[in-house]
Amino acid sequence: MKQTTLCYLEHDGHYLMLHRVKKENDASHDKWIGVGGKCEADESPDECMLREVKEETGLTITSWRYRGIVTFISDIWPCEYMHLFTADRWRGDETDCDEGDLEWVDKNRLFDLNLWPGDRIFLRLLMDSEQPFFSLKLVYKGDDLVAAKLDGKPLVI
C-alpha cells in the first residue's frame, strides 16, 4: 500500500500551491497540488510531511494540523493512502522546487486552477473550518473521478 502526504501551507487567505510542470512522465503534469510526497521506510505521516515540505519549499513547518486521510482507488495506479495536512506557521526562506513552480494562490481563485477532480472535494473540506478530521475515498477510472465517499457516505460528484 502506497502511503503519501500532502500539505497546504496557509497564509493571509492563500495556499502555497505547486504547479507540476518540471518532471517528465508525471501523472500530475500541469495540475496544481499542495506539497508532499511518498513516505519512506519507518517514517510517520507527519515526519514525511515535514521532510517533503522542507525538500520542496525550503520551509520548516512549525505548526500544522492533520486534517484527514484520502484513499485513492484507480484502475491504472496502485491503491494509495494520502495523509492530508494544513500548516499555518513555518520558518526559513522559500526556495525553488524541482518538481514545479510554487505560487501563493488566493483561496477564492483555487477552483479556477487545473485541479484533480478529487482535490476539489478535499480542498472544500479543508476550507471548512468546522470540518473535523475526515476520511475520503476517491475512485478513479483513468483521470475521471467516478465515485467518492466521505466518512463512509456516498457523495454526489
Image (tube, rainbow, N blue to C red):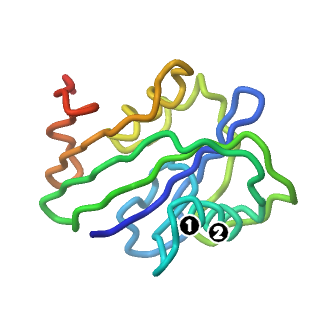
- Residue on which disc 2 sits: 51
SS at mark 2? helix
Q: Nearer the viewer, residue 70 or 35?
A: 70
Give coordinates of residue 35: x percent, y percent.
Answer: 58, 56
Rounded to the nearest angstrom, the CA distance separating label 2 from label 1 is 5 Å
Q: Residue at x 71, y 66 (%)?
A: 54
Q: Residue 127: which quarter of the image? A: top right
Quadrant for the C terminus, please.
Answer: top left
Vertical relation: 11 (above or below) 84: above
Name which residue type carries label 2: Arg
SS at mark 1? helix
Q: Residue at x 46, y 27 (%)?
A: 132
- Residue on which disc 1 sits: 48
Give coordinates of residue 14: x percent, y percent.
Answer: 69, 33
Name which residue type carries label 1: Cys
Q: Residue furthest right?
A: 92
Q: Residue at x 60, y 66 (%)?
A: 47
